[in-house]
Amino acid sequence: MFDAAMTGLLDVLSPHSMGLMLIGILIGFVVGVLPGIGGPVAMALMLPFTFGMEPIHVFAFLLGMKVVTSTTGDITAVLFGIPGEATSAATVLDGHPMARKGQAGRALGAVLMSSLVGAIIGAVVLALSIPIIRPIVLAFGPPEFFMLTVVGLIFMASLSRGQMLKGMIMGCAGLLIALIGIDPQAGVPRYVFGQLELWEGLGLVPIVIGLFGGPEIVQLMLSKESIAGKAVSRNIDGVWQGMLDTFRHWKVVAWAGAIGSAIGVIPGVGGSVSQFIAYGQAKQMSKTPEEFGKGSIEGLLAAGGNNNAKDGGSLVPMIAIGLPGSVSTAILLNAFLISGLNPGPEMLTTHLDVTFSMVWIMIIANIIVVILALPLLKPLARLTFTEGPILVPFLLVLTVLGAYAENNSMFDVWVMLGAAAVGIVCLRFNWPRVPLLLGAVLGDLCERYLFLSTSLYGWSWIQRPLVILLGMIIVAILFKTVWDVRKSIRRSSEVRA
């Protein structure tokens, strides 16, 4: 195994592989910063250019591009409150409030370094799991997937601490949004009101962009100030502080990376689910949970550390049994077949060096993107001090482009505008937006896996060992949330007395 790891490293460090990786990184950097286009779209567009390449070169190009989009998507989320990727939604929650406080440099430094550490955690998980991945992947069935989605839904309560009733209402509204479209079981349209565009449901990207980006643009337009507002300091010197924060709060990043890797292994659950679970877990462990959503460095590190770790996990089922864990890995699976490789035992024996090359590509590509991004962080952070009237037209173009780009549909632009209106109302009347997004993300998965569980096993699936374990985790999360709420109520009553 050591020989295969060294062979994979030497193959990746060859001039041809490194050249292709740098090209992929540059493409991924641009794509990640622009909202809506997304890593999977860029990979699909570049796939035809990989015909005739050696397998190592293919993965250096495509995988290098993919891991970079996950990192750079956070830059737009921090600076403008507009997620560059759908999986950057949790980054907006604390990254943009930090930018509004004049701490954009610190936020960018933190999110870059935590993404690098998360990528290393994901790569290590991939390397260590090579001998044991097959039984782990096969141990999960629809009942376990369903329980994981319920774990995600339970975090709606912890993410709405202090506004639990409002949070649950918004979460239920998100679940209703997830029901729009064709019923996957009966094959009949639901809540489409005669509109053909609604048959495929509402896209996640326009909802995320509108819900979080729209209110920020309106605030910027009305205030006529910069994003950082009247921040006391305009000295962009917090980049290194943010990078050091990653190591000061290493437990948060380690937990986020572990959660991202573990959930990434499970096909079909998705990066957004993983990120919100990591974010909720960080809030549960934090000594200052009241700061989450207002510019908490711990919340930002949880989102950043999770972001790239999930990529390493999602490669595990694809390599082991040819089962892609995400859209990106489905495209990589096509690249496998084009290169003449077959996922499964061959990747763990004959082509073990190729498998290890993916581990090295994830680590090296993230190190390179951090090195490339560092000189750009201060100029990018200065954008947050640019006056609002100058930035607003640019941000409007970004939001419309981001909403339109996923499906090339003007309908998605209208969805984005509707989500922006909802986000503005939520901000005005102090209603949480995260549970709405979480419900919309998890609703479809929850329905699908519950149907499959009852169809395959009746109600006996409740007795499965992993289901029972996940059920105990859910009870523990609920108990801790209720306990923390009661403790905060007791404290507030003592202060009044």
Image (tube, rainbow, N blue to C red):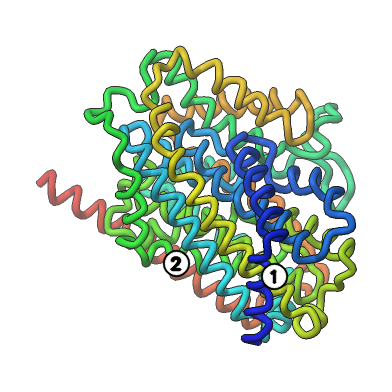
Tell whether label 2 touches label 1 (CB within 8 Å). Answer: no
Image quadrant for the N terminus?
A: bottom right
Residue 268 shows in the view: no
Residue 34 is situated, as x and y percent measured from the top left of the image, at 62, 34
Q: Amino acid at mark 2?
A: Trp
Residue 466 is situated, as x and y percent measured from the top left of the image, at 62, 79
* Left or right relative to 408: residue 286: left
Depth check, front residue: 260 or 268: 260
Residue 365 is situated, as x and y percent measured from the top left of the image, at 59, 57
Q: Residues within 10 Å of mark 2 (few under 14, many from 20)?
A: many
Image quadrant assignment for residue 202: top right
Q: CA distance from mark 1 to mark 2?
A: 32 Å
Residue depicted at x 13% and y 51%? 494
Please say if 165 is above or below 306: above
Look at the numbered disc 1 and give the secondary structure of its residue. Answer: helix
Residue 458 shows in the view: yes
Q: Amino acid at mark 1?
A: Asp
* Left or right relative to 376: residue 436: right
Residue 255's label in the rendered image is 2
Residue 434's label in the rendered image is none
